[in-house]
Structures are given as C-alpha cells and as structure tokens.
Amino acid sequence: FEPTKYNYASMARVRQANRIKDNIDLSCDFGYLLGALCGDGWVSDCRQFYICGLDQDIFEQFHRSLHCIFSGDVPTPVITERTSGVGSYGTCIKLGYSSVEIATVLDELIGHKAKNKHLPPFYLTAPLEFRKGLFAGLMDTDGSISTSRGKKRPQLMASYSSTSIRMVQEVKLLAQTLGIKSNICSFKYRGDRTSWMLTFSSPDIARWGGANMACVRKVM
C-alpha cells in the first residue's frame, strides 16, 4: 500500500517526526488498526485521529499497531476520560493522535463520520493476514460475542452493528472471505433512527475463534 497515492501527497510535505511511511505492509497490524478505527474511531476536521471506548486491552493493541504506519516513533496520545451516563457501562476513554499526513490518508481509507464509514477499497484483495486483522479490529469495537444459555446446550452468538449499511454489507463480504456466513437485518434505536446488524453463523464463528482480537471480555 502506497500512501503517496492519496490527497496529502499534493501538499507541501512537512518534515516532522510523525510522518507516514512511504510504503505500508498490508499486515495483520495494519488491518487491525483500520478495523478498530472503522468501529470506534474517527478523523477530526483539524486532521487528528481518535479512538474511544472502555477497554484498555483494545487501546494497547491499537497503539502497538500504529508502528506499522508511522515512519518514526509513535507519538504519545492525548488521553481524556469522561464518566458514562445512566445506562452506560463505565468510564469512556478517548485517545487522540496528531498527524496531518496520517489523518488525511485514514479519512480517505475509512470515510468521515459514522454513516459514511466504509472498509478500505482493497479489503477483498488484500492478503489473508490483513483481512484477519481487519475483521478482529471490527469485532473488538462494533462486534458482539456472547453465549446464550436459553436452551439445553449453550449457544454461541456473534453479531456486528453499524449505522452505515455500506459498512455492514462490506463486513459481510469480508467475513465470507474468512469462511464466516452471516445475515443482515435492521432495527430502530433512539426513536426512528435505523441501524444495521450482521448475525454470524455460530459454527463459523466458533471455528474462527476470535483470532487476533484484543478485547479479553469478548474473546471466546
């Protein structure tokens, strides 16, 4: 993957420690990074990028994965916390990173704002390790894995949710390349807002086994 093909290449390049690599391997780490950003991350208008959530293990994996795109040392993120309100699950942590070059490329690769998010254009033709990392990052953030005990035998349940129908359709195709079947349905939330959900085949998810995921409370 060559970042110089994207918009920031037309700008006067600033010589800074936080530059993007000229060539980025389509590795499991790069896949995880993009998957996690598609789920709980975003790029700001001032060209910073963020990830937000509750799980420290995801933050640690995300930060480690950044080495695959920074040409120098990975910068220390700006960390902010806020206590979640009624009906939430704990203290929400936000990590912010500053790099105009990297934020610009990420914005084009995964889209801007929740409803416009999408997977990178090369996700179906990327190497297997990249696709595995991408799926793990998606499941760590907007995915859900649990065990239902409503029947005689415990049943594994796994799903992925997004307000972007394009994202859900693309995750479905990605999962198929990993041998995981799924179905799409819609549901309403906060009144008349529509969200989309993929429900995955339990046997297929069991065979996948949470490979490359970081979130301890989700991993089977």
Image: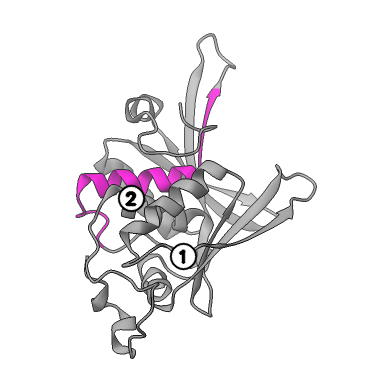
Which quadrant is the N terminus positioned in? Answer: bottom left
The residue indicated by pointer 2 is 29
**Residue 128 in magenta?**
yes
Q: Secondary structure at mark 1?
A: loop
**Residue 131 in magenta?**
yes
Tell me the number on the disc at residue 171.
none
Residue 3 sits above or below residue 86 on the image? below
The residue indicated by pointer 1 is 75
Residue 218 sits above or below residue 19 on the image? above
Callout in the foreground (1, 2): 1
Q: Residue at x 56, y 22 (%)?
A: 148
Q: In this image, 139 relative to 191: left or right?
A: left
**Can you see residue 142?**
no
Residue 112 sits above or below residue 163 on the image? below
Give the image location of residue 13, x and y in percent: 33, 86
Q: Which image quadrant is residue 12 in?
A: bottom left
Snapshot colouring = one colour
Q: Nearer the viewer, residue 95 or 219?
A: 95
Mark 1 and mark 2: Cα distance apart in space: 17 Å
Q: Nearer the viewer, residue 101 or 199?
A: 101
Region of the chain picked out in magenta, as a range = 122-147
Give the image location of residue 24, x and y in percent: 25, 63
Q: Residue at x 29, y 83 (%)?
A: 9
Amino acid type, residue under disc 1 in the picture: Pro
Q: Secondary structure at mark 2?
A: helix
Give the image location of residue 159, x and y in percent: 48, 38
